[in-house]
Every structure is written in C-alpha cells, then in structure tokens.
Amino acid sequence: MGGCCCCDVDTETTALVQGAGPGQFSTTVADHPKWDAELIAELGRDSRAVSRDFPRLKITIVVDNKVEYVPVELPPTNVSGRSAECREIVLRLAKLFGEHAEYHDRIDRAWQVAAKSNPNDITLSVWDACVGSGIVSAGGKAQSRTFAALQCFAQGVPFSASARMQYLLSFPWVPHIQDVWWSTIVSYDSRFSEHVTITHEYDVKNYVDRGSAKHTPEFQVRWRVSILLSTATATVLACNLEATDAWITAAPNCPSSAFLRRHNAFVARMRDVFSLGVTTVDELPGSIAGKQGHRGHRAEASRVSKK
C-alpha cells in the first residue's frame, strides 16, 4: 500500500478562530516589557537573599577571556567546602572592584570565624562572614561595591528577565517552559576596566508528552541576561537580554499540518525577535547544553543609570 496518509485533525482551528495563531504570543503570559527596570528595582531589596542563594550557584570567573575560577562539585552537606568557595569568589570580586586591599584580611578573618560558628548552616555562615568583614551591615545595607555586586546573585534579580523571555518564547500551543540548565559567569576585560559583567545563562525547553508529539515539536533555547556594573560605583550601567542558540526537533515521518505550522512559527519567531537561526535536530541537547556557550545575537538591550 506504500504511502503515508497525513490526514489529521486540525488542532488549531479553535485557536485560529480566536485570533491566536500558531505564531502568536500567548495571551496568558505576562509580557514584562520593563523587565530591566524590574531587575534594577530588585537589586538590594532583600540583602539576606544573597546568603541564601549565592552559595547555591556555580559561578565561573573569566578575566581577559581566560577562565580564572571554576567551582568544584561539592555535596550540599560539605558546608566547609562550600563556604570556602564563597569566600574565594568574594575575594575575587573585591579585587575586580578595587577593594581587595581594604577588605582582603577582613574577609579572610571573618570567613574563618563564621565557618567555625556555623559548621552546619551555609546560609548563616555566609551572612555572618559578610557582616563580620564589613562589606554589608547587619541591617542589610551594602557598605561596599563587593557586596553590591553579590546582590546580583540573589535568585529574584534575574526573575523579570526570565519572565520576559518566557513571554518572548510563548505560543498558544506551549503550556509550559522549564529551565534545564543554569550557570552564572562573572567576566572582566582589562581593556574596559571601568566595568564588570555578571551573566546568568539558561537553557530552557518546552515539554511535549507522547500524545502531543505528532502535532507539537520540542524546542530548546539558550539565553542569557547580562548585568553590566561600574567598577567605581557598582551601579548598573546596562542590562542585556539575548538568545544565543536554538534547537527544534525534526518533523516525524508523515507529520501533521499542525506540527509543520508550529515548527515554522518557532523558526520565524527566533528569526524575527532574536535574529537567530534554528538548528533542527533529532534529539534536543538537554541539560548539557550551554556548557560550551558562545556569544550570540542580542535580542533586547537597555542602557540605564542608577542615581
């Protein structure tokens, strides 16, 4: 009989009638057009979040395009080792922001005291060390450029950028997008010594169950939000939101018309919004994607100043 019957129920008829075609943004996802202002407003709102979220991050430090520091994989129970990693990152930040001479010894001593006082609680250990070294007051006021930079590591800071990206990747046929990988990078280029960049990089994907696979492709996008800080004041000079890579699953044998429309809608979205091409693959990269990330096309950028 040899042939393939590709007749299928058009699952998008209702959506099209309602004006929500396969390439349109979802009407159920907030657009967050002022994501950059929201991000800046979040900085410093909850200083204690630094000690809660900072130790959870895997932070890489890059100076003049060379990786100077990469965290070691440590179990959550290794409080001493994780505290030592946090101390190392704080010392390196102090150096980048020109506060190494002022705070090095104070940070070193405070970290040792805090580690002994809180051997089983990484959050308390990091907070006590930050307060003890004087980079932040007990009330949470940043007293140094170093701690102001640490505030970029609070989980709530990149939330608005993530929400904006969720909107930019929204379609009527995508009920949910999830993170599959996340990394944080601190970068400094001595040719531009007036600033340090802190970047949160993510891989996200839509999940498609087996029953929807004939009609809906899976896609994965690598994106990042970069926060440019002044080394003189640690204020925000710019926030950049960009997508750098995108993948989508290839059409199955005898794909439905809905699958093809959705596939084309995603490719068009990445082209029109991000000026980015899409790689078609049999299987998405998954959680390993992003570990060899590269600079890509900027999607949205906002130059801002904080008085």
Image (cartoon, rainbow, N blue to C red):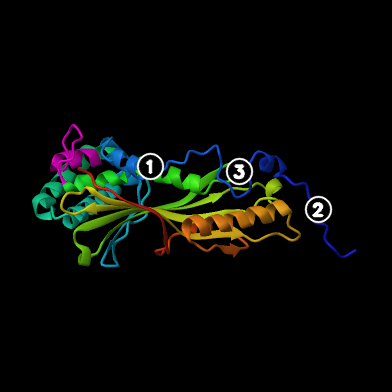
Q: CA distance from mark 1 to mark 2?
A: 44 Å
Crowdedness near tag 2: few (<14), some (14–19) or many (≥20) residues, C-alpha within 10 Å = few
| In magenta segment, residue 189 | no
Q: CA distance from mark 3 to mark 2?
A: 22 Å
Q: Do residues under tags 3 and 2 come within 8 Å of each other at their CB atoms?
A: no
To which residue does mark 3 refer?
A: 172
The local secondary structure at tag 1 comes to loop
- Kind of residue sitting beneath label 1: Lys
Judged left or right of residue 37, residue 107 is left
The picture quadrant where one finds residue 100 is bottom left
Name, please, the residue furthest toward the top.
Answer: 139
Residue 156: x percent and y percent?
A: 36, 40
Judged left or right of residue 51, residue 181 is right
Which numbered disc flags the more N-terminal residue, 1 or 2? 2
Provide the residue span drawn in magenta: 126-144
Q: Which residue lies at the image location 76% right of the left edge and 59% below the top edge?
A: 254
Q: Which residue lies at the image location 18% right of the left edge and 31% below the top edge?
A: 139
Q: CA distance from mark 1 to mark 3?
A: 23 Å
Crowdedness near tag 3: few (<14), some (14–19) or many (≥20) residues, C-alpha within 10 Å = some
The picture quadrant where one finds residue 68 is bottom left
Residue 197 shows in this picture: yes
* Between marks 1 and 3 in the image, the one whose residue lies nearer the viewer: 1
* Residue 296: numbered disc: none
To which residue does mark 2 refer?
A: 7
| In magenta segment, residue 131 | yes
Name, please, the residue furthest toward the left.
Answer: 102
- Kind of residue sitting beneath label 2: Cys
The local secondary structure at tag 3 comes to loop
Closest to the observer: 301 or 252? Answer: 301
Closest to the observer: 39 or 188? Answer: 39
* Between marks 1 and 2 in the image, the one whose residue lies nearer the viewer: 1
- Kind of residue sitting beneath label 3: Pro
